[in-house]
Image: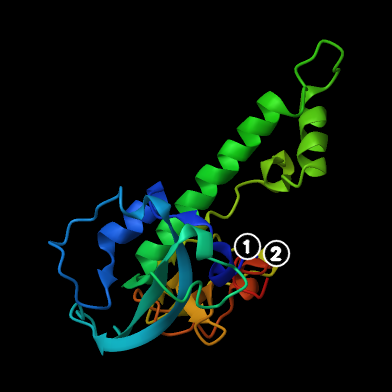
Amino acid sequence: PLPSLSQANADIKADSSMGKSLLKSARRLEDGDDDGEIDYTYVANYSIKFQGCHHVSQWNAEVDEDNDVCMQTVRLARFRLCPTGTCSNDKAIGCTSGFGDYIVDLDTFLASYLQDKQETEEYNCEYAQNNVCGCDADDVDDEDTCLNTCYANNGLSYCIEDEDEGEQFQAMDYAACAQYDYQADDDANRRRLDEAEEEVQYFIGAYCANQGGDVRLGFFSDDTCTTKSETSYSALTGSSLPYSTES
């Protein structure tokens, strides 16, 4: 399951690709005297601490059909910019001095987080392969088996590729609310539902869980990811929706 973002981001550097992306899109919660430009030399010694997220209801300006939701849910993420030396996972607030609080839409936050996570994992896998595992040695009979064993022994299970699992669920595809395309299979006890002679559409998107302390993926019936679907993801697919339960 998706790790709690409130615990995963205390050591994200503000001048990293994720940090720059967030700061470029975020709005500071207190008035400042700067000109709106981010000085990345200034934030080089700062880290990002996820503070939580919350929902706001607002009028859906793109309503064009009778079954569109009139009031949509807007999700916002709040994070704190803390001096790196004082930014701690053990503190929910991250730090108590020398900080700045920012707010950004949850889609942007989640996309940045997932991109940073992907880049970090790819780097870790490549580093282990080239510098730790030694599976390219002449006395290694099966390099793939050697690598998978090395990854497992070093806590890098995400590096292991399982060809039997087929196409993997990509959370990045649903960083913003997006339609879920599924293949109905009666033999696997999956259902295709029709309403007004049209196929029912389903959407997956992020929402605030655990009183705003976590970000999870949910299964919705509208393109703003406001209304939870009465049909569950597991009823359609036979498996649980990734990143939707407590870690």
Q: Nearer the viewer, residue 200 or 49?
A: 49
- Residue 124 in percent (x, y) is at 62, 39
- Residue 239 in percent (x, y) is at 68, 67
Q: Nearer the viewer, residue 186 or 179?
A: 179
Q: Label 1 near label 2: C-beta < 8 Å? A: yes
Q: Residue at x 74, y 29 (%)?
A: 132
- Provide the residue designation for mark 2: 188
- Picture quadrant where residue 151 is located: top right
| Badge 2: residue crowd in 10 Å (few <14, some 14–19, many ≥20) | few
Q: Any mark on residue 185, and which?
A: 1
Please, is residue 220 above or below residue 118 in the view? below
- Residue 39 in percent (x, y) is at 25, 52
Q: Nearer the viewer, residue 192 or 152?
A: 152
- Residue 218 in percent (x, y) is at 52, 75
- Type of colouring: rainbow
Left or right of 33: which side holds 41?
right
Residue 71 in view, yes or no: no
- Pick the quarter of the image with the C terminus: bottom right
Instruction: Give amino acid for label 1.
Output: Asp
